[in-house]
Amino acid sequence: MPSNPSSTNSAGSGPGHPEGIIPMVLTSATQQHFGCVADEDVTGENPYKLLKKDDILEDMKTKAAVSDFSPVKQIILDYPESELLLVFDRDFIYGQLFYLVVTPEAKERILNPPEPEPEEDLVNEIKTPEPKEWISLGSEKEIDEESVKETRGKLMYMFSRARSDFGMPVSFLDRNVTDAKDGNLECVSYQDRRFNIKLLQRDCGVQAIPILQSSSAQTQWKYMRNNCTQYTPGELSRSEKEKTTQPSLSDFCNAVTNRVLHALQQEEIMNVFRDDWMALGKETEDVDWSGKVSDALMLNQAFSDPRYSQDKEISCMHWHPTIQNVIAVAMTEKKQQNLIRSTGPLIVFYSFSDPTHVKILLECPDDILAFEFCPSDPNIIVGGCLNGQVVLWEISAYVVHLHPAQHGHHKHESLKTDMLGLEDKKHSKAPLVRYSAMSGVENSHKAPVTDVHWLSQTFEVTAQGIPVENKSNISVQLITCSPDGSLMFWDIRMPKQGRQTAPDKKQNDLESQMANYSDNNPFKHLERTWKPLIMVPLVNMERNGDYAPIRFSLYPYTNNIINSTTISENVGDGSAVSADYSQLQMPSAKGQTPLPDINTMIYIGTQDGEIVYTDWKMERNDLDQLLSPKPLHFFRIHPCLVNTIERSPFFKDIVLTGTSLFGSSNIAIWKEGVLDGPIILLPSLEGLCTSACWSLTRPAVFFVGKGDGKIEVWNILENTGEAVHVQEHMTNGKITCIKPWTVSSKQHFLAVADDLGIVRVFQIPPVFYTASRNEKLNVGKCIDQQQERLIDLLKRQEVWQNQTPGSEDHKEVDPEKPGTPTEEQDDMKEYDDFLVLEESILKSMGFTP
């Protein structure tokens, strides 16, 4: 959008650019939607793109104030033609990356520029200078003396061959030159120590000529023109030469000679061009992170507001899906803090425009351990609480605070009406957004909600646990997990029975108390009555009870056929940008189309370090009862609580898991469908592995956050034994969450949150975001090789077990149980042999009787 909102009142009235154009800022999502991605669809050679007026109006209708074209809405509506011209301004001539042509005259002027008239008068006036007659000053004599002349006659050699050898076939062989009389012997030159000439004088010629220098400037090349320039060197007059040789010049030289000699001496002793700031703190260990300048990840922004981050730690963090340079973090109380809370649990929004002050505050009933933006409407946010409840927020009325330009515009308007001069205090306070809906305690999890994810907007789940087609193409369902041993599916639409069923007096009193803020609340039908659609228990395969899930990962199911206009059509109001969820109702089970191609398998990381691979789709038994299926497989690879389950953005079937325990941790990479174990198991890492994430641009790279404030960069194509880069002193606390984000093709960020309540955004260097040639193909081959290696290893182990001679010890071993007694017996046997050897050595030395 334009940098100055007030300049969009009339076409081309902004300062610094011609009439008829308006500079524009288009996000990457808008560029992809209209097919004008910078340096791909539009380039410096072909910078023009015609946009249909109807498409722009549809975009403004869909996104409203979030649309990049909303500031120039009236100008677009008044435009007479059906297509508008968008120009890619790669050199930022008018201050932005694009500018929109809003008048037909300017559009015709840009597409068909007038041809310049040739200046015939100037061409006729140009005269070619005539060469002057050369006057000899004796230089030809010096040239003649320096020229090389032959002083002896030339030697002549004649080579002949017998006539009988003419036309004979030639064969080349290797032989020693001493074996034949006519062989050639090489005479290698060598230095004779008895003969030495000392060079005392050398004759060389030096000619003083002007230094040739090439330079360039950003000029607009219109047409070629012949020009010539004649000049004569400027010489000083005799009086001017006498002034330059006055004693003042000699006094100046005498005064500065000592300082110049001292400077030259210091330059020889030390490097005067060394950057002391870059070298500051490199030779010391106990330094603060702010004084540590890294050669890899460079600090770009640090977000902290002492009013809300003091004595808090960050449990979850997400970048805003559509608004650039905005990040949301969940602040929770530290476990060791038993003091009175200064502020309650909050989710705060930071912006690059003001890193030290929050933009929006989301009120939370309890500490939030996980939250996520809705994929179809980023103004809707869901979070999971420490007490097991699920909370919804709707922030469409407060999105204006996240836009710096619009926020400044509102501030300017309020200053005109504020006569007491108190606007600065009002503006510095961020708005507090109350939650729109919250599940009841009796219908929620019995333990903290540790992870939450929205279902894809292309399908939904019925009350019987069957995936069906989502005809509205809106994300209306989500999944939560908790260590209470269950997964819960939630639906944010109104139940089919009506707004309320059997309300009691207490519920009516509660709704009347909340009427002051719920009039415009689209989810007031869920308040205190929201309950899960389905609850899927995770039955333990080994012992009685259920698994305790901490993290889970769904298979990303997407459908390319998504009609964005359906959102407003289902609501019934075509002018609305997003759906009115207060009017959406859950459809009946009749007439819904099941989707058999939906992958309902899910990876789950438990509190005990287990990786469970199961199906969340409910099954019916012989008594027609809905039961959750037993897990397909489980693995004990990690020693304790699994804190990371991340799917690769390039391979949907590749999953990264991580855990930590008492100073040691490990990372595993899994392939969906391979039920024999992880295809890659990285060695135990030093320090706590608190978080991990894949790179968004390199398929082989992922980042690992440590408990001691380090960031490790791993590349599975280069080395699977150790990290390719370790960055220390990223923070003074423990890293709790890391999230990558891509702003443009040359700007990639990595957000790092810690337990001190501070968010730091680091700029990723090109070596870690520029993919090598065929990197994705090579990663796919590496994964296939690791899968074949795992299968071959399992076959070899089976063969070794069959070939091992039977014994009583081996017969008692159950190979399917983890931690088999075979290993323990081997260790005990080695220990007994060591005791026998120790006793024999002590007896031989006479230390024992």
Image: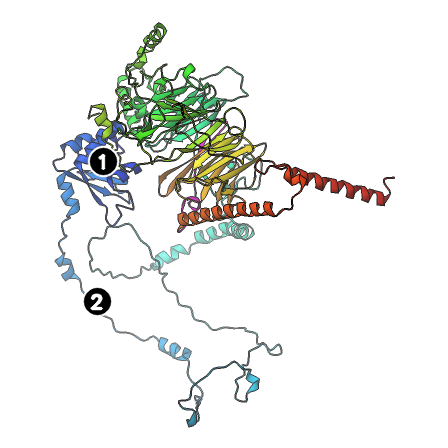
User: Three-letter amino acid code at disc 2?
Assistant: Pro
Q: Is residue 509 left or right of residue 222?
A: right
Find residue 706 and report its horizontal and vertical position in percent: 52, 35
The region drawn magenta spans: 753-773
Tag 2 secondary structure:
loop
**Which residue is depicted at the point 35% across and 43% down?**
745
Find the residue positioned furthest to the front: 622
Along the line of sight, which residue is nearer the eye, 392 or 555? Answer: 555
Is 418 rendered above or below residue 151?
above
The mark closer to the camera, 1 or 2, is 1
The answer to whether residue 245 shows anywhere in this view is yes
Along the line of sight, which residue is nearer the eye, 543 or 377? Answer: 543
State the CA–CA distance, disc 1 to disc 2.
47 Å
Which quadrant of the view contains residue 371? top left
Instruction: Tell me if residue 755 is in the magenta stretch.
Output: yes
**Which residue is depicted at the point 13% across and 40% down?**
104
Crowd around label 1: few <14 · some 14–19 · many ≥20 (10 Å): few
Mark 1 lies on residue: 15
